[in-house]
Image (tube, rainbow, N blue to C red):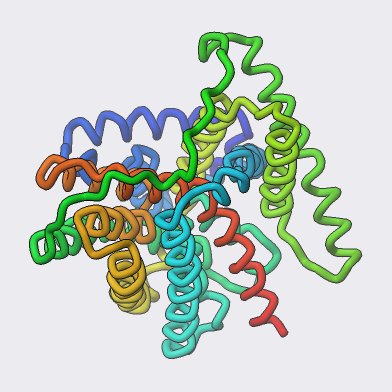
Amino acid sequence: MNLELSGVWTLVAALVTIEFGKRMNRWLPWLERGNIPPAVSAGLVLSLLLAGLRAGGWLDVKFSTAPRDVLLLVFFASLGFGAHLGRLLSAGKGTMVIVLAITLVVLGQNFAGIALAEAFGRPGGLGLFMGSIAFAGGHGTAVAWADSSEAASLPGALEIGLGSATLGLVLGGLVAGPVAVWLATHKVAETRGTTVFSRGEEAGPEREPAFSSDRWLPSLLWICLCVALGPILRDWAAGQGFKVPTFLAVLLTGVLITNIADVARKPLDTEVTDLVGTVALRIFLAIAMLSLDWASLVKDLPMLLTAAVAQVAVTVIVGVVVVYLLFGRDRDAAAATGGFIGFSLGAMPVGLAVMRRLNTRFGETPRALLAITLAASLYTDTANALIIAALFRWLGS
C-alpha cells in the first residue's frame, strides 16, 4: 500500500514526531543528557518502523518536500541574522583563537572525509557529508546540502549526512567532557579576570514582550525578504560564474541585512528571528528524519563508523593544539577546549552543556564561555557553508 502525504499532513506528522520525541527524552533521561533533539530521537525510531513496513511490503509512506524546502530557507535566514561581524571584530584574543580553530577543524574534517570516501571507493564529494557538513554543521546543514544540485550525483548523501550528524551528537557529549577534564586536572591555574571584549557591550534597546505581534511582524518581514532575495542573489552569482545553493544565498542575504542594520544602529530583533529559526529547524528536521531511507545506509555503515572515529581524532587534535595551547593552558583554556570539541562534533548545546559541567566541578570560566558563544554563533555556520561550497567547486573541477 502506498500513502503519499500532502504538505499539511506532512507538517502534522512532523509535529507529532516532535511531541513523541519530547516524551521519549523524558522517559529515557540519557537522551536528554546527551542533548539529542526530540526530532532526532523520535525520528530515528519512527523512520526505522516505516522502513520495516516498507521492506515488508505493507506500507510505503511518501512525505511532501514542499514544507521542508520552505522551512530550510527560514532556518538559514535566521542563521544569517546572527552573524554580527562588528561584534566578532571587537572581541578579544580568545574569540579569535576559536575562529582560527573553527576554520582549521572545518578544513580538517572535510579533507578527512574526502580521503575516507575515496579509500572506500566512493566519490570524494560524499566525504563532505562525513565531514563538516554533518559534524560542524549538524542535521540541518546535512539536509540542506543533500538537497542541493552539488549532491545530485551522490546517492545516499542524505542518509550518510544525517547518520554522521547523529553520531556526532553522541560522540560530542562522550568525548568533549573527558578531554577537558584531563586538561583541567593536569594543568589547573587561576582564571584570569579579563574579558574577551575590548569594551563593554552596549545595552540593547527596550523591547516589547517576546510574544508581542509588534515584535514578530517586522521579524517575519525580514525573514520573508531574505527568502525572496536569496534566489535573486543566487541567479546573479550564477551569472558571474559562481554556483551558489539557494539556502547559502539566503544565509548570505541575512548576513548582509543584519550588518547593514548594525551599521545604521537599527539592529534586528534577533531574539525573535532566532526563535522562528529554531521552530523551523525542529519541524524541518522531523520531516527529514521521517524521510530517511535506512536500506541505503546499511551498506555504508563501516565507512560511516570509520569516518566518525577519524573526525573525533581531527577535532580533538585541533582542540588541544590550537584552542588549549593558544588560549593560555589554564582552566579557561580547558573549558574552551571542551566546548569547542562539543560543538564541533555535535552541536552548540552539547558544547555549552560540557562547559557547564566543568564550571560546576572546577569553577567559573567566563572568558571561555564568552569566546565560545561569540565565535560559534557568529562565525561557524557562515564559514562552514562558504568552505563547503568552495570544496564542492574544487571537487567538481
**Residue pictured at 47% horizontal, 34% vertical:** 200
Compare residues 354 and 184 and report the one nearer the observer: 184
**Residue pictured at 49% horizontal, 39% vertical:** 199
Q: Is residue 279 above or below residue 291?
A: above
Image coordinates of residue 204 in percent, x first then y, are 55, 23
Can the viewer see residue 1 in this picture? no
Q: Is residue 279 above or below residue 309?
A: above
Q: Quadrant of residue 124?
A: bottom right
**Residue pictured at 53% horizontal, 40% vertical:** 284
Image coordinates of residue 191 in percent, x first then y, are 21, 50
Q: Is residue 311 above or below residue 117?
A: above
Compare residues 101 and 69 and report the one nearer the observer: 101
Left or right position of 46 against 150: left
If the image is split into quadrants, where does the C terminus sit? Answer: bottom right
Compare residues 98 and 385 and report the one nearer the observer: 98
Q: Is residue 185 above or below residue 115?
A: above
Can the viewer see residue 319 in this picture? yes
Image coordinates of residue 194 in percent, x first then y, are 33, 46
Count of picture labels: 0
Left or right position of 2 against 20: right
Left or right position of 223 against 99: right
Residue furthest to the right in view is: 239
**Residue pictured at 63% horizontal, 15% vertical:** 215
Image coordinates of residue 115 in percent, x first then y, are 46, 86
